[in-house]
Amino acid sequence: MLSNRLIVIDGTALVYDAGSTIYVARPDNPRSLDSSDVLVVERSGGQLCKQDIVRTMDQTLGFTTGVVFLGDFIPYR
């Protein structure tokens, strides 16, 4: 499940945990990233990729708090 593997580093990056490899995407507007928000990913295909739109939503009130445009996913082993 994607939500269990996607980690937000506040104001910095999204990290996707694929087991022995993690993939780090630093968005164009990292200030929009806040681990207290809910991420809503609008995928363009079967995998999370640079073209996907990620919206952040307030957990309590449910309104959109920002939009994140992903950069390239860089693999780290």
Image (tube, grey):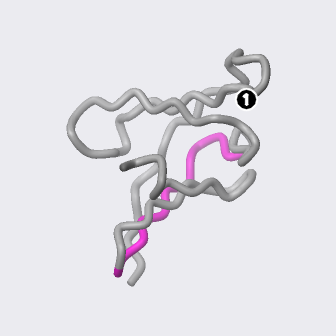
Please rate how many residues cluster around mark 1, counting C-alpha atoms within 10 Å: few if below 14, some from 14 to 19, many from 20: few
Report the quarter where the C terminus lies.
Answer: bottom left
Residue 5, located in which quarter of the rendered image?
bottom left
Whole-percent x, y for residue 27 in the image? 56, 47
Residue 51 among those drawn in magenta: no
Residue at the farthest left position: 46
Q: What residue is rendered at 57% in x and 28% in y?
A: 55
Q: Is residue 60 above or below residue 12?
A: above
Q: Is residue 42 left or right of residue 62?
A: left
The total of numbered circles placed on residues is: 1
User: What segment carries the magenta color?
Assistant: 20-30
Whole-percent x, y for residue 58 in the image? 74, 26
Q: Nearer the viewer, residue 3 or 74?
A: 3
Residue 22 among those drawn in magenta: yes
Q: Nearer the viewer, residue 53 or 35?
A: 35
Q: What residue is rendered at 71% in x and 37% in y?
A: 37
Q: Which residue lies under the disc numbered 1?
A: 59
Q: Is residue 25 left or right of residue 44?
A: right
Q: What residue is rendered at 78% in x and 24% in y?
A: 60
Label 1: state its secondary structure. loop
Whole-percent x, y for residue 25 in the image? 49, 56
Q: What residue is rendered at 33% in x and 31% in y?
A: 43
Whole-percent x, y for residue 66 in the image? 68, 26
Q: Is residue 63 above or below residue 74?
A: above
Instruction: Give the amino acid type for the residue marked by disc 1 in the picture.
Output: Gln
